[in-house]
Amino acid sequence: KNEVEQSPQNLTAQEGEFITINCSYSVGISALHWLQQHPGGGIVSLFMLSSGKKKHGRLIATINIQEKHSSLHITASHPRDSAVYICAVAGSARQLTFGSGTQLTVLP
Amino acid sequence: DTGVSQNPRHKITKRGQNVTFRCDPISEHNRLYWYRQTLGQGPEFLTYFQNEAQLEKSRLLSDRFSAERPKGSFSTLEIQRTEQGDSAMYLCASSSPTSGIYEQYFGPGTRLTVT
């Protein structure tokens, strides 16, 4: 079993829909990252959180430490949101452990 | 501050050849990380430097792989005698002394194709 599991693996939505991507992890963590990766490979950090909820524009990230679960929400989705979204956790080790990503496609 | 840069962006090589990638972290970031990402998967940790010291290496980093950060600034990742299984995106990230591992800034990656 992977330490970080994301669901769904693939998600197709219509423009304007509310989107949720889930991340579950099995190890104790200090922080959790949500990352965005566009075609071509570059990764951008969206959120880093260790508790509660953060909001940036149309993006909202929540984390429940007790349940070892985090969600990334996108409100009023747009085709430019199409990308791979990756959850990564920072535990006791010095490196991040990544999920396999969720491929999001938003259709106009 | 121009962010983390990596060169080259793309590399195509024949099996058995050696390749070297370079990563320039954000200035004053003392921590530098190398990750490998195969198609359809999330990145996997390869190795980590704090200043010039290589503090951690993954079991993924076989004897054919070597990484250096000679002056604690840029880093190089060399793969000797490349194999087709080495085809992947190689990502570099850096973080500052204050934020540590918790806030890593990623470069655009180097995509390696071994034919």
Image: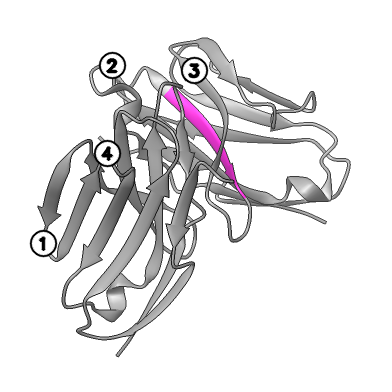
At label 1, counting other C-alpha atoms closer than 10 Å, the crowd grade (few under 14, some 14-19, many 20 or more) is: few
Q: At 52% across and 54% down in the image, what residue appears?
A: A100
Which residues lie in the magenta part?
Answer: B32-37
In space, the residues marked 3 and 1 are separated at their CA atoms by 34 Å
Q: Are marks 4 and 3 in contact (CB under 8 Å)?
A: no
User: In the rendered structure, the residue with mark 2 lies on which chain?
Assistant: B
Q: At 12% across and 56% down in the image, what residue appears?
A: A56
In space, the residues marked 2 and 1 are separated at their CA atoms by 28 Å
**Residue B17 position in % (x across, y down):** 84, 40
Chief secondary structure of the magenta span?
strand
Residue furthest right in the image: B16
Residue furthest front in the image: A66
User: In the rendered structure, the residue with mark 1 lies on which chain?
Assistant: A
**Residue B99 position in % (x across, y down):** 25, 24
Please tell me whether residue B35 belongs to the stretch shown in magenta: yes
Q: Amino acid at mark 3?
A: Phe
User: In the rendered structure, the residue with mark 4 lies on which chain?
Assistant: A
- Residue bearing mark 1: A57
Residue B49 got which mark? 3
Q: Amino acid at mark 2?
A: Pro
In the picture shown, does residue B67 fall above or below A77? above
At label 3, counting other C-alpha atoms closer than 10 Å, the crowd grade (few under 14, some 14-19, many 20 or more) is: many
- Residue bearing mark 4: A66
Q: Nearer the viewer, mark 2 or mark 4?
A: 4
In space, the residues marked 2 and 4 are separated at their CA atoms by 29 Å
In space, the residues marked 4 and 3 are separated at their CA atoms by 32 Å
User: Is there one chain holding both mark 2 and mark 1?
Assistant: no
Residue A82 got which mark? none
Q: Nearer the viewer, mark 4 or mark 3?
A: 4
Q: Are marks 2 and 4 in contact (CB under 8 Å)?
A: no
